[in-house]
Image (tube, rainbow, N blue to C red):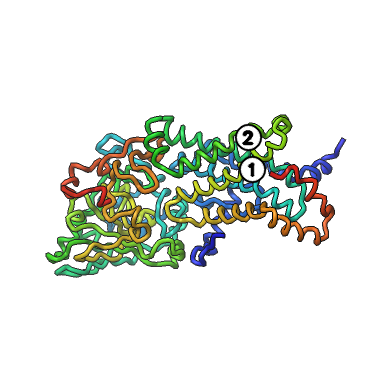
Amino acid sequence: MIKIRSSEITPEHIYLNRRAFMVGAGSVAAGALALAACGGPSAAPANTTPAPTPDLATLPAALANAEPFASTDKDELGDPLNSYQDITNYNNYYEFTTDKEGVNPLSQGFNTRPWQVEVTGLVNNPKTYDIDDLIKQFNQEERIYRLRCVEAWSMVIPWVGMTIADLLKDVEPKSEAKFVKFTSVMRPEEMPGQERQILNWPYVEGLRIDEAMNPLAIFATGMYGKPLVAANGAPFRLIVPWKYGFKGIKGIVKIELVDTMPVSTWMDAGPSEYGFYANVNPQVDHQRWSQASERRVGEIGRRDTLMFNGYGEEVAQLYAGMDLRENY
Amino acid sequence: MQTLPQTLRKHWLWIIVNLGAITPLLLLIWNFYTDNLSADPVAYVTTKTGQAAIMILGLSLACTPINTVFGFRQVLTVRKSLGLYAFLYAALHLLTFVGLDYGFSLKYILADALLEKPYIIVGLAAFLILVPLAITSTKGWMKRLGRNWKRLHQLVYGAGVLAVLHYVWLVKLDLLWPIIYGSILALLLLLRVPRVRKWAASFQKKAPSKAPNVSQRKSKPMIA
């Protein structure tokens, strides 16, 4: 018999949520076997998106749209953007739930203000920024990127954000600083997924400092011309478009410059399946599935996965001479 | 001529099982027409058909133990239907994977899925086991195969184990539900081990029941 650890027992509100789902789905011979589905849709209406907390007038222009806005409807390869609805209602954010469609309903009560981001470690000017000041201090601009999930699905998303380089220049990393370590918010009272120890909370991610300084690497503060919603990692998250989506840590509260390679949450959970680099690479498979192809969310059929998610020209030189099979 | 209440009293289980088992399919169709198949309809349909298949397969495997433990013979009358429904959803699940997810592209299916993903092979094996069982589920085949029919249909245990393994293997991290399915399956299989079955049935004999003992004997040839 397989034992279930007490830490794996579902907390009541999630259980109740499942119940709601079961009723909704009219499960077979209700009550005969309580075999509910995980990964399915939540019963709560998933179409509502909360109004952004700060009022529009105080926001930089790139974030101040009342309705979802993007400057174009395609990425540079000619593929259409995914819709605002899709991007806000299909999220891997295990701090709330492992159910992609459950994240938005469960994150409605998440407080994104007040919010501080502490930048510390091997820097000359350690600072703690208030998110509203940070958004104003650094240039916020639209970046249309493909997001390739390690689960082999992808989207095209018009983020709004700022380069990591801009922030790092402000705090002046010391010469010993080799890596940047990011830490997510820990708030189990607002994030029910953190009550379950499926990952070691809080979520941690890292980049080599030269990766972080690459102009493609950004902190997103918005999406479709509006401030991020909680489900997408509000108010401050990482986007590294040539890496698998799980590198894009959400709800960042702490950034540390360090001299040794940080152990990311997923490396800790499955070192043979998830590496530090996690570059999108169709030639290096995940231990249990191929990464050669992907499905664009909303499309039927598959498409080839591109090396570095199609950003090789900008980032391949970062890995010159490295064995990408070793450094997965 | 039976009156409606009589019919309901006699066939309530059959009615509930058929309504329940067809519900996931009706919901999918409904959600398709109302545009509620989520942001990723392919993943949604794959997940839903897979869940229905494994759940109903589990229910079909629960019939015999339920009779053993509770002496509830009527449950044996829906076992075949449940097995066929499980096959239906498994077939839809496979078709979704091949058609909607992989666009019937042999290149992707071979290079990307079949040769690369162990859980695909395991899932396919589970389905391939169900095919001959579905074909030989008729009374005619039962007669033709005689004693071998039962032996053949015991393969369903293998399908159950493979289906759970398929689920365990494909989950990225959260093993809660695969473990729940696996535990229930282990219990259902355990209750078929002759010694355990006898032990479980002994409770039933002691308990006041409308038809004690009968179930054990008469149902025996049907146990699969």
Q: Residue at x 36, y 40 (%)?
A: A294
B207 to the left or right of A65: right
On the image, the x and y values in percent for residue B56 come to 61, 45
Tag count in the figure?
2
Q: Which amino acid does label 1 sit on?
A: Gln
Q: Say which chain tag 1 marks.
A: B
Residue lying at the far right of the rendered structure: B1
A313 is higher (above) or lower (below) than A211: above
Is residue B31 in view? yes
The residue labelled by disc 2 is: B134
Instruction: Find residue A124 and report its image quarter.
Output: bottom left
Which of pointers 1 and 2 lies earlier in the amino acid sequence?
2
Is residue A45 in view? no
| Closer to the camera in the image, B176 or A219 | B176
Q: Which amino acid does label 2 sit on?
A: Ala
Per the model, the C-alpha gap separating discs 1 and 2 is 13 Å
Disc ID at residue B154: 1
Q: Residue at x 17, y 55 (%)?
A: A210
Q: Residues within 10 Å of mark 1 (few under 14, many from 20)?
A: some
